[in-house]
């Protein structure tokens, strides 16, 4: 059974303003919820259609499909919905490669980038304050549990990079040195920019190494690679070099 | 001015059945339409809100925003909509790497894979007959003009691979040899499978080299990489090896 105030609270959580106010966010789908249950995240509410969590160490409130539809952000709700507390950021490491995002605005791209960080063992993702919120329901959905394994910090990216000027700061550009021939190390900071406008000028000035993915199509008319694809290829290159050393 | 029969025709083209019947498909957005105009594709109808194509060698029918909304498949229509003829497939090359898709079902994934093929100079993409149609409006949208530069052929993938048994047939699996340490050549065929079920058994039997992208996250709980991400990383590896030779 779902109370009116619960419906109001949960549906408000698609907005960053209310996520911040309540320090809560929504996770949907049995698999994703399980990943959060077995992580450091603290459960606040759990609803399920039927006794999905019978053998787990959690208590879920049974609701109907119709009730789930009322609180779900998905067009086809997936049997369970949970609300978790937004955790405090952990300190940012500095002994290995960190990914930095300067104004990524598409939730699907951020979710994919979080999955890629998880896949390639990147522990820290830092985001400029205008990057889409990682607790946005679409980001949570597309990151598929990887959010539980990557430490994400929102900060003033310019200030942060100024304070780390003694480190390597790589920037992904359309016109940098080829990632295949440039000497990269699996540490420092690797910056990706906004989908339309790329990396801001003030951040660009702090970059110590401009890198790019060369295009092999003969007529070279192709639009730039989507930022998530560029992240996939660059993280693959950075990690490959490390294991080959 | 838009006629009733034009509206009926265009809106029917979101279905494969009607695209096949009329041998027509829709392209939306000024930039994408331009890429098709300057390709081998043959224009059938062109509509624009205002005189966008004034200085181009084409004639567009002016329509209102409200009319565009009636025929557009986008939630925010983008000033122009064109209908092009579906071209005949060109012969498939065999002197360089071909990408093969076994049952890709998500239009966004196919569109992204087409963009990646274009970026990495892959001329031929072959698709099992149950792969989503490349003239699906969402595929056209997400491939962003790259469709004009990649030759896509739908065929019986099993039959086709049986006929090419003397070539290298790479398959992307979760449990293959690491792409970083396996010796790959930039020719042969590289097969990717369906988003949920991977490569079908009958195709798997024809694969001569199983490759995969190793996971670096410490606890290795991450879901498999999305197929478009896997394609990005693998195509990057195949082309890198070629230029380093």
Image (cartoon, coloured by chain):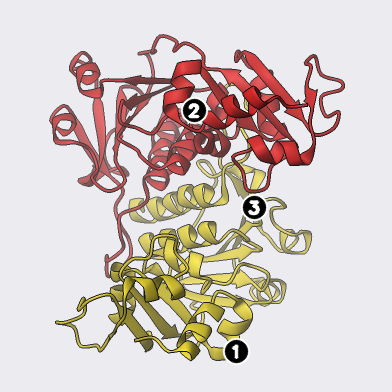
Chain colours: A red, B yellow
- Check chain identity for marks 3 and 2: say if they share one: no
Measured from the top left, where is residue B53 in percent x and y?
21, 80
Secondary structure of the residue carrying tag 1 is: helix
* Distance Cα–Cα, label 1 vs label 2: 45 Å
Q: Which residue is mark 1?
A: B21
The residue where tag 3 is placed is B195
**At which x and y percent is residue A92?**
38, 13
Which callout, 1 or 3, points at the residue further toward the start of the chain? 1
Circle 1 chain: B
Callouts 1 and 3 on one subunit? yes
B237 sits to left or right of A3: left
Question: Horizontal placement of A145 versus B143: left or right?
Answer: right
Query: Where does residue A183 sit, x and y in percent of width and height?
Result: 27, 34
Between marks 1 and 3, how big is the CA–CA gap? Answer: 29 Å
With B38 as the anchor, is A205 left or right in this view? left
In the drawing, what numbered circle is on residue A135? 2
| Residue at 66%, 63% in the rendered image | B103
Instruction: Bin the neighbour count of mark 2 within 10 Å (Cα to Cα): few under 14, some 14-19, many 20 and up.
Output: many
Can residue B188 be seen? Answer: no
* Viewport quadrant of the N terminus of chain B: bottom left
Chain of the residue where label 3 is placed in the rendered structure: B
1 or 3: mark nearer the eye: 1
| Residue A170, image quadrant | top left
Marks 3/2 in contact by CB < 8 Å: the verdict is: no
């Amino acid at each position: 059974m779902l109370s009116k105030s619960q419906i109001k609270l949960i549906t408000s959580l698609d907005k960053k303003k209310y996520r911040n106010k309540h320090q809560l966010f929504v996770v949907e789908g049995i698999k994703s919820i399980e990943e959060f249950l077995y992580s450091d995240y603290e459960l606040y509410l759990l609803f399920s259609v039927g006794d999905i969590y019978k053998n787990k160490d959690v208590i879920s409130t049974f609701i109907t499909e119709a009730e789930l539809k009322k609180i779900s952000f998905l067009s086809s709700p997936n049997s369970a919905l949970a609300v978790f507390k937004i955790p405090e950021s952990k300190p940012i490491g500095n002994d290995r490669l960190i990914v930095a995002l300067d104004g990524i605005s598409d939730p699907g791209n951020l979710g994919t980038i979080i999955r890629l960080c998880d896949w390639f063992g990147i522990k820290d993702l830092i985001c400029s304050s205008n990057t889409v919120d990682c607790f946005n329901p679409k980001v949570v959905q597309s990151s598929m549990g990887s959010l539980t394994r990557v430490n994400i910090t929102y900060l003033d990216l310019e200030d942060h990079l100024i304070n780390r000027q003694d480190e390597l700061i790589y920037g992904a550009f359309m016109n940098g040195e080829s990632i295949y021939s440039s000497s990269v190390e699996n540490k420092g900071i690797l910056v990706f920019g906004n989908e339309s406008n790329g990396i801001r000028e003030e951040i660009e000035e702090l970059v110590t190494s401009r890198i790019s993915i060369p295009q092999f199509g003969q007529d070279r008319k192709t639009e730039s690679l989507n930022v998530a694809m560029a992240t996939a290829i660059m993280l693959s290159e950075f990690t490959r070099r490390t294991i080959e050393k």
